[in-house]
Amino acid sequence: MSPSYVLLLAFLIGLFSGLRSLTPSAVTAWAAHLGWLKLERSLGWIGTTPAAVIFTLLALTGACVAMAGAQGIVLGAVIGIAGALVGTFGGYQVRRRLVKPLGTPDFVVAVLEDLLTIGGSLWVVSRF
């Protein structure tokens, strides 16, 4: 897997974190727990059952994806943070601009965002 592809995946998991902060963290923790992500000892504990259950590692999802793709943890974290910023602010703008013109309640757009986040996060971790 090319380094640029791995870093794109780290960016995307960060972007999904920005959309729904706990969902990608949960998916990453469960992916490690189920053996989908092969993590070295320093981040391997994210795959423990308690970590998967309480979703405490949302800031490290980019680092986990980068590590699983044999890239640097720090660079993965930085790329993941950049994705989270884009997801947070960009996601807000998209939501705001969809609710009014569509004339739908906010929760309809939120459910679509949840589905995008879950599906996108699963797609990212399934690349390994």
Image (cartoon, helix red, strand yellow):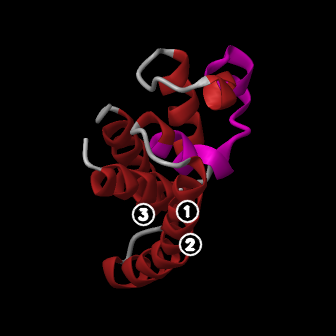
Kind of residue at badge 3: Val
| Residue 21 seen | yes
The answer to which of 33 and 111 lies nearer the viewer is: 33
Asked if disc 1 and disc 2 are in contact, CB closer than 8 Å, the reply is yes
63 or 25: which is nearer to us?
Answer: 63
Residue 23, can we see it?
Answer: no
Of mark 3 and mark 1, the one earlier in the sequence is: 1
Distance CA(mark 2)–CA(mark 3):
20 Å
Badge 3 crowding class, 10 Å Cα cut-off, few under 14, some 14 to 19, many 20 or more, is some
Asked if the residue at tag 1 contacts the one at tag 3, i.e. Cβ–Cβ closer than 8 Å, the answer is no
> What residue is rendered at 67% in x and 15% in y?
49
What label does residue 18 carry, if any?
1
- What label does residue 109 carry, if any? 3
The answer to whether 44 is drawn above or below residue 24 in the figure is above
Please tell me the numbered disc located at residue 85.
2
**Quarter location, residue 101:** bottom left
Q: Amino acid at mark 2?
A: Leu
Magenta range: 46-66
Disc on the earlier residue, 2 or 3: 2
